[in-house]
Amino acid sequence: MLAKRVIPCLDVTDGRVVKGVNFVDLRDAGDPVEMAAAYDKAGADEVVFLDITATSDARPAMLEVAARTSEQCFIPYTVGGGMRSVADMRAMLAQGADKISLNSAALKNPQIVAQTSALFGSQCIVVAIDARKVPGSHPARWEAFVAGGRKNTGLDALQWAREATRLGAGEILLTSMDCDGVKEGFDIDLTRAVTSAVSVPVIASGGAGKLDDFAEVILEADADAVLAASVFHFGELSVLEVKQALAREGICVRIPE
Amino acid sequence: MIVIIDYGRGNLRSVQKGFEHAVAHDLDVRVSGDPKLIAEADGLVLPGVGAFGDAKASLDRGGLSELITQRALAGVPLLGICLGMQLLLDKSLEFGEHEGLGLVAGTCRPFPQDVGIKVPHIGWNTLDFSAARSSLFEGIPAEGSVYFVHSYYCALENPAESIARTDYGIEFVSALQKGNIFGVQFHPEKSSTIGLKMLSNFAEVVSKGEY
């Protein structure tokens, strides 16, 4: 049976991890590659690198991170952030990245989703959607934001999820901006709305705080994967603890050897 | 020397790094499309991501289809990964009908639409290799999980050539062995400890010449 996935996310700028870490035995706690390798050993099913580098001249650092990741980390990894052209993405995949996550670039030019999924395969193309609830909307509506959540596109998030999938996105990485950083659980309503709207796997992100949160979004909103950053980096929860909690709820997970 | 066959398709770097990481001793693993190296190799790996027809056409163009077939029939250990496994078969029904290498009798078919599954099959799923014995699974725990990304699966004519099965809506052949010819539908290079162990098992087959 296909396992539900647990995915740590690493924010990277200029080739360095932004948030602090609690892993023992790391020679360099700021090195995203060492962290990815440690997450592999800890039983993570995938790793996502989000390049939040502000300036474009520092971008090559992420290519170097990807190249080294393929030497030390033997689970699939996704790279997102900053890639705009097909050439950017091709270069990243050539380093060994398994998937490319597109957010602003896809909203600005949806055809890039069609183009790259035809070229590299849908399984390579993840469309990341940062969604925020329209205040006071009832029934609830969500809009897609770009530029790290600073800019509202005014586009309905569900409609965009459907469109992105139609264009060839193989997966949706869904972040609730309302829940992100609050640590009071994933956004169940938003996640359920998106998993009902599309037929591709949906990765739920934003809001993980305690063990029960992960099972909740899988059981109640049908998420295919759960992503979290700070609870893992700060050592509040381990990947294994999360998986064991999911297994206790009868959810199929991969328990590492 | 193991040659990972480069024919312009798929993620070869990860496979190479996987071998280098998995095998302790100095293993010469090269990524190459050079017929001369392929003709000299002690073991061959046929990777592949993308569409069957395109991939086969690329192999044909480089004259590699014939060379790979020749070497496999001469007993050189060959490991097909993902699309590389599918290419070992007689044919595929992906976007029309395309002829494969014909090393293993069978047809590559799409997952059925009506069994309530999401296609492609992406993620970690378990292997059931209890019904067969293969050197590829030496030291691999029963019910171990590996990473899959595919929309088509291998339907074999000879069930005895199936060495592992996986359940995804239907039960399909997730690994095959026909003598010195091996195929895995999953990505060992992305399957953490278990996958690396399989790569080292294949390297062992190559160095000992026993399977």
Image: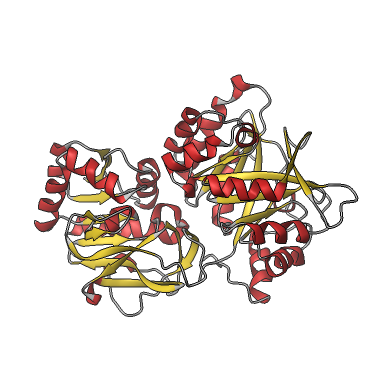
Q: Is residue A23 visible?
A: no
Instruction: Determine whether, in the image, residue B11 is placed left or right of residue A131.
Output: left
Q: Is residue B153 visible?
A: yes
Instruction: Using the image, determine if residue B174 lies above or below residue A115.
Output: below
As drawn, the residue found furthest toward the right would be A136
Q: How is this picture coloured?
A: secondary structure
Quarter holding residue A7: bottom right
Instruction: Determine whether, in the image, residue B204 is placed left or right of residue A39.
Output: left
Work out whether residue A225 or residue B77 is closer to the camera in this orientation and state it.
Answer: A225
- At which x and y percent is residue A211? 75, 65
Work out whether residue A232 or residue B174 is closer to the camera in this orientation and state it.
Answer: B174
At horizontal 32% and vertical 55% (from top left) the residue drawn is B94
Instruction: Using the image, determine if residue B159 lies above or below residue B125.
Output: below
- At which x and y percent is residue B10? 36, 43
As drawn, the residue found furthest toward the bottom would be B131
- At which x and y percent is residue B204? 26, 58
- At which x and y percent is residue A209? 79, 57
Instruction: Using the image, determine if residue B139 lies above or below residue A55.
Output: below
Instruction: Determine whether, in the image, residue A183 is placed left or right of residue B159.
Output: right
As drawn, the residue found furthest toward the top would be A57
Instruction: Using the image, determine if residue B117 lies above or below residue A92.
Output: below
Q: How many marks?
A: 0
At horizontal 17% and vertical 50% (from top left) the residue drawn is B42
At horizontal 48% and vertical 48% (from top left) the residue drawn is A122
Quarter holding residue A195: bottom right
